[in-house]
Amino acid sequence: MACSQIMLRIAILLLLLLTISSSSSNLPDQDSISSSMPSLLYPRKNVSFTARLIHRTSPESPFYDPNAKCDDLIGDGIRTSLARAHFLGKRTSILAESLINARSPVRVIGVDFVMSYSIGTPPVKTFGIADTASHVIWLQCQPCDRCYKQSIPFYNRDESSTYKSLPCGPRCDSFGDTTCYSSSPWGAICRYHSDYMEKSSSNGYLSTETIMLPDNGITGEAILEDMIFGCGTENTDRDTKPKPPGVIGLSNRTSSLIGQLAYPRFSYYIFTNSSGTHGWIHFGLSATTSGPGTSLVPNDFGHYRLSLVGLMVSGQDIDYDFSSYNQAPEYEGGFVIDTGTLYTVLDEPIFNALREKIAYEVYDEEPQSYNEIDHGTRFELCYKNAPDYPEVEFQFANQMELMLCKSNTWVKVSNGLHCLAILKASEGISVLGMYQQRHLQVGYDLSINQVTMKYQVPCPDNIE
Ligand SMILES: *[C@@H]1O[C@H](CO)[C@@H](O)[C@H](O)[C@H]1NC(C)=O
Ligand SMILES: *[C@@H]1O[C@H](CO)[C@@H](O)[C@H](O)[C@H]1NC(C)=O
Ligand SMILES: *[C@@H]1O[C@H](CO)[C@@H](O)[C@H](O)[C@H]1NC(C)=O
C-alpha cells in the first residue's frame, strides 16, 4: 500500500475544548427542584467495558473515502495538528488564523477515531469521536432547531422512554459553567453551550439517558443508565459534508464519560497493520493502567498534562532546559497528551533543539523540508534515505521513558522523502499526538492522577 499512514490521517477534531459554558438566562428560584434532588450528586457507574475505536479510513467507518489521496491526508494531518495545538493552548496566533482561512479549511469537527454505541429506549445506534479534550458526551438530538448533516439516523429524544432533561439545581451547577434555561417547554432545565474552533458549536440541554455498548467479544454488552449527556439541538458546522453525530468527552471532568464511572480509568491501544488502523478503548476495571507511569500535572482545563523532563537523540540530551517549561501555566507552555492530535507538536525552542541534534547525528545527508502545498505549514526535517535514523526518546517525570520506534518517528511523503513526523509551533504548548502513540497501550488512572505507557507489541521499524 503506497501510503499506509493514510490510516492515520487524522482529520481531527478540532472539536476540542468542549467547554460547557453558559448562555445567559436568569434563574428563577430553584429551591423546590434542588431539595428534591438526591444527596448523592454523582451516582458513578460501576461498569467496565471495552469498545472498538473505528478509524475513519476503515471501510466500516461512515466517513470512509476510498479516493482520499495520500499527500492530502498528510497535509490535513499537519494542519489539524497545528490547529489543535493552538486550541489546547488557547492562544491566538496568525498561523491558526491562516489555517482557518485556508482554501481547504481545517475540519472543525473531525472524524478520527469514533466509538460506536447505542442510546435511548428503544436504542438508536450512533457514534461519537473519542476525545480527551472534550468535557461531555454530546450528540445531535432531534427535534433540532439546527442540526448539521450526518450520515446515519438521528437520535430523537421524543421517541425515547428513558430520556430526561436535567433540571436546574446542584447537579447542573456542579458541572461548571452551565446555566439554567427557565423558559423551556419542560420548565427550568440545565443548558450547555460548546464553542469549537471558528464558527462551529453545539448547544442544547444537559440530559440523562441510557447508553449501551455492544458486545464486542471481549467484554459483554454494557448498559449505563442515567448517563449525563448533552442533547444538542443547535449545532453548526461550516463543512457541508456529513459529520459525526457527536463526541465522547474523555477529559478529566465530572461531566465526561470517564468522570461518570466508579473506576475513573481508561486505556487505549491503536495500531496499524496492512489492512489499516485499528483500535480498542477500555474503561473501568477493563483498562490497562499498569506499567511504567508518570504523574499527571493537575490543571484547570481537564487536560492530561505530563511533565516532560528530557528529550534524547541517540542517547544524548538535546540542548534544552525543560525545568522552566514544566512550571509554565498551561496557556504559556507545558506538554499535553491528546487523542485529537495526529502529529506531535513541539514548542519552537524544543523543536529546534531536537532538529539540530538529529541533523547532527545524520551528518552524511543533506536535510530537506516538505512543504505542504499552499498553506505554509510543513515537516521541517526530511531525508532522502538516511540509512540509520537516530533514536528519539521522550523522558517524563517518575522515570517514564517513551522510546519512539522508527515507524512512530518518521513518515514517508509522496516524493520519497522520509520526514520527522513532529511539527514545530509557537503556541507555547506541546502535544503528544496519536501518530506517536501507535502500538502503545496508553492508560489513564484518574484516581491516582497517572498515565502509563508501554508497547503492546514490538513497535515496527518500517517507515510508512
Ligand atoms: C464494582 O463491582 C465489582 C463487581 O461487580 C465489585 O467487586 C466492586 O466492589 C464494585 N465497586 C464499587 C466501587 O462499587
Ligand atoms: C489487522 O488487525 C485487525 C484487528 O485486529 C484484524 O481484524 C485484521 O485481520 C488484521 N489484518 C491483517 C492483515 O493482519
Ligand atoms: C482531575 O480532576 C480532579 C477533580 O477535579 C482533581 O482533583 C485532579 O487533580 C485532576 N487531575 C488533573 C491531572 O488535573
Image: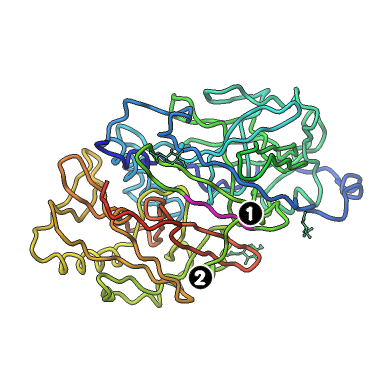
Q: Position of 276 compared to 189: left or right?
A: left
Residue at point 51%, 69% (across, down): 293
The tally of labels here is 2
Residue at point 59%, 46% (across, down): 249
> Disc 2 to disc 1, how far (Cα)?
20 Å
Mark 1 beta carbon near ligand 1 (under 8 Å): no
> Element under label 2?
strand
- In the rendered image, residue 294, in percent from the top left (x then y), is placed at 51, 70
- The question of residue 332 being in magenta is answered with no
Residue at point 16%, 68% (across, down): 361
Q: Amino acid at mark 1?
A: Ser
- The question of residue 268 being in magenta is answered with yes
Colour scheme of the rendered structure: rainbow
Residue labelled with disc 2:
294
> Element under label 1?
helix
Q: Give ligand 2's quarter of the image.
A: top left
Q: 303 or 237: nearer the eye?
A: 303
Residue 91 appears in the picture as rendered? yes
Q: Amino acid at mark 2?
A: Thr
By secondary structure, the bulk of the magenta-drawn segment is best described as strand
Residue 198 appears in the picture as rendered? no
Residue labelled with disc 1:
286
**Crowd class of label 1 (few under 14; some 14 to 19; many from 20; radius 10 Å):** some
Q: Which mark is residue 36?
A: none
Q: Magenta part of the protein: which range?
A: 265-269
Quarter location, residue 355: bottom left
Q: 415 or 279: nearer the eye?
A: 279
**Crowd class of label 2 (few under 14; some 14 to 19; many from 20; radius 10 Å):** many
